Image: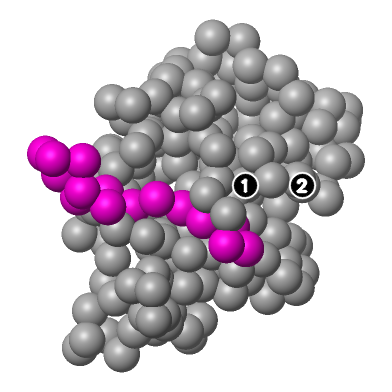
Amino acid sequence: MRQVKKKVLVALCLILVLVGSSSVFIGCSGSRVVWVDIDGTSMYPTIRHGTQVRADRRLLNPERGDIVIVYDPRAPFLNFLWVKRIIALGGDTIYLREEFNGTEYYFVIEINGYDLDESYYLDDHYGLNLNYRMAWNWMRPDAGNRGPFGFRIALTERGRYEIHVPYGYMFYLSDNRRNPNTLDGIDEGPQPLTHMWGTVIEIRN
């Protein structure tokens, strides 16, 4: 009987994220600082498929630019996990400004009216264009310009799309934004900080 319970416990201590993002595979550990296996390419090239990251589960107050592990917002109670980068926090206003570089349209991200400098972690080939994904359903007239959780997306007088992040919430994106299979804040909107699982403190590519 004890052997059966032990096997069940081991099975429950393994968490596997299956779809929608770079996924996380975690062995059950009593430590608050754990190594995590990454399955997927939504954070490429910062984090590569099959690599390991070290996460501190005590760090649950992120700053802009932090890479975090969060519960899948579609079903947080199932303990499915994503790895993402924090773009904005509670009280921030995000503006998405569409520009044309002579070849394609893409979005420039502004935070509180200032262009967000993402040059130190985004790769030109993977990260600059948000327009490629047909996930901008918030902005379709027939969608009422609302995100999945009712966050209002307003088109401002300057031609920018505007998202207000409520206090106690975070807004995250993938680094590999051209991946059509990824899911992040563009699809799911701002998420509560209570969905934080931990903060990445080391990457072993």
Circle 1 SS class: strand
Magenta stretch: includes residue 191: no
Say left or right for 1 vs 51: right
Mark 2 Cα-neighbour bin, 10 Å: few <14, some 14–19, many ≥20: some
* Horizontal and vertical percent position of residue 86: 62, 47
Q: Which picture quadrant has residue 59?
A: top right
Numbered range of the magenta stretch: 99-113
Say left or right for 150 vs 70: left
Magenta stretch: includes residue 109: yes
Q: Name the outermost residue toward the top.
A: 205
Residue linked to disc 1: 86
- Which residue: 33% across, 26% down? 124
Type of colouring: one colour
- The vertical placement of 164 against 48, above or below, is below
* Horizontal and vertical percent position of residue 32: 87, 32
Q: Nearer the viewer, residue 105 or 190?
A: 105
Q: Are marks 1 and 2 in contact (CB under 8 Å)?
A: yes
Q: What type of secondary structure mainly makes up the magenta span?
A: strand
> Which label number is shown at residue 62?
2
**Amino acid type indicated by mark 1:** Ile
* Horizontal and vertical percent position of residue 79: 61, 52
Name the quadrant of the N terminus: top right
Circle 2 SS class: loop
- The vertical placement of 40 against 97, above or below, is above
**Amino acid type indicated by mark 2:** Pro
